[in-house]
Structures are given as C-alpha cells and as structure tokens.
Image: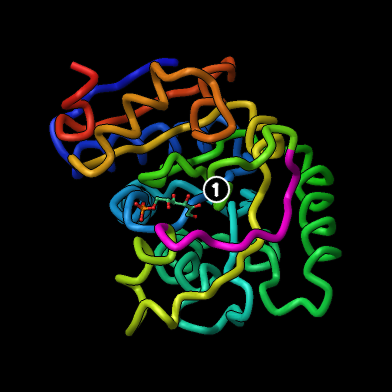
Amino acid sequence: MKIIEVDHYDQMSQEAAKIISEAVCSNPRTVLGLATGGTPLGTYKYLARDHQLNQTSYTQVHTVNLDEYVGKAADHQQSYAYYMNTHLFKPVGIPHTQTHLPDGLAVNLKDEADRYNQTIQTLGGVDLQVLGIGKNGHIGFNEPGTSFDSETHLVHLTASTRKANATYFSTESDVPTQAITMGIATIMRASQILLLVSGIDKAEILYQCLFGEVDEQIPATILQTHPHVTVIADQEALTIVK
Ligand code: F6R
C-alpha cells in the first residue's frame, strides 16, 4: 500500500481530489466508486472547485456508490443518493443516468442487491474506488465478520455504526437499521482504491488496517492484499502508525 502523509483533513481532501480529477482527465469514461459520510465531503468540495476553475468534464463518467440505507427514497435528505446529488453529482455535472446507487426502497432487497452487483459488472467494474473506514474497520457497510467473498448484499447495521451515523439524524433511533452495500469481493475488484483517513478517532483502526493480521473481524485488513491501494491519512490518524 502506498501511504501519503498529510498534515490535516483539508490537505487530505485536496490530495484526494487531485488524484480523482487526474484519473477523470486521463480517462473521461472512468467508473468512479464513491463513498459518503464525513470523510469525503472535503474531497467533493475540491472536485466541485476544480470543475469550476478548470472545467474538468464529468459528462462521460459513471459512478457507483458503496451503499444506501434501506427505507430512504433518493429525494430524502438523509439518503445517500441525496447526499451525492448535493455534494458531487450536481456540482460537477454528472448526468443523472450515469450515477448509480442501490435502491433502498426496492420491494425485494435481495434482488436489488443482485441487480446492483450486475450493474457494476455491466459497467466493466470500478476503475477508482474511494473508501472511508469505520472505527470498527468496516468498509462500505461490511461490518466485522462479513465474508471476504461477499458480493453486494443486504446488511443489518451494528449498534456502533448506527451510533456513529446518528450525527446525521435527529435521534439515534431514526438511523435506519438496514442498508444495501457492495460486498468485500465487489470492492476488491476495483482496479485502484483510495482510502481516506482523518482524525484521532481513526488512529487505532488505521494501524490495524495497515499492520494487523488480515482477518474478517476487521474488514479493512483485506486491503493489504489489494495490488493498488493508496492511503491518504492525516497526522492525527497516523498517530499510532508513527
Ligand atoms: C460510506 C461508507 C462507510 C464510511 C465509514 C466512515 O458510504 O460506506 O464505510 O466510509 O462509515 O464514515 P465517516 O467518513 O463518516 O467517518
């Protein structure tokens, strides 16, 4: 794994945006795999800025997101579709039909997971996958214990993940209990992975992710076996590594 050390969150976001915009410039038909949550917000802000300043074109880009909550419509403010439309898709002008997320309102959630997995394959797979990491080592919503062979599937969110995501809801009980997520095998098929890690809260798990035994109890440890991972981490997140 290549590790890029940066001073702070803002610098992490700038570096990540640079890597993503360069990928899009060198291949305008790039398939981007994208994450939500707090970590990539700054990256999306810099991508929007770059699009305005340098006219980087996203008209041919396709995107696939890691996950979506069950029970949230795409126009619901707490859905990941809404987050992506607001923070990235509209600001950089990705045509709506080229943006893909699981449908959290699907009647048959298992069929929806299979359909989404097929969508990713039909696009030819992900060229560049952006990841954040949960404090328990989850990537996407693949919680500890998820099989490394998993494809896109329905998950029951753990108490710790629901607690971490409660900041985006009025109360913890409003946080959905289920989500559809790309599986670990799905994520690992991406040609390139960009893992973003910021803050002291992520220091312990970043250390485990980089140097711990590869173990399904800490899903992110699988990234050690991927041939093309770049980690951009700030000083606080690197506290234990150094
Ligand atoms: C988001 C996702 C999650 C987050 C992780 C970290 O689409 O799949 O794995 O990347 O929970 O979240 P933040 O960035 O909010 O700390």
State yes or no: residue 156 in magenta.
yes
| Figure check: 237 above or below 210 | below
Q: Closer to the camera, 237 or 103?
A: 237
**Position of residue 73 measured from the top left corner of the image (x, y, whole percent):** 61, 82
Residue stretch rendered in magenta on the structure: 150-160
| Figure check: 3 above or below 27 | above
Query: Would residue 50 be found to the left or right of residue 148 on screen?
Result: left
Kindly indicate the quadrant of the structure image that contains residue 75.
bottom right
Residue at 78% of width from left, 69% of height from top? 109
**Position of residue 157 measured from the top left corner of the image (x, y, whole percent):** 54, 62
Q: Quadrant of the N terminus?
A: top left
Task: Identify residue for label 1.
Answer: 143
Q: Is residue 150 visible?
A: yes
Q: Specify the amino acid type for callout 1.
A: Glu
Kindly indicate the quadrant of the structure image that contains residue 95.
bottom right
Query: Would residue 131 be found to the left or right of residue 14 on screen?
Result: right
Badge 1 element: loop
Residue at 36% of width from left, 38% of height from top? 196
Residue at 58% of width from left, 47% of height from top? 142
Query: Would residue 70 be found to the left or right of residue 112 on screen?
Result: left
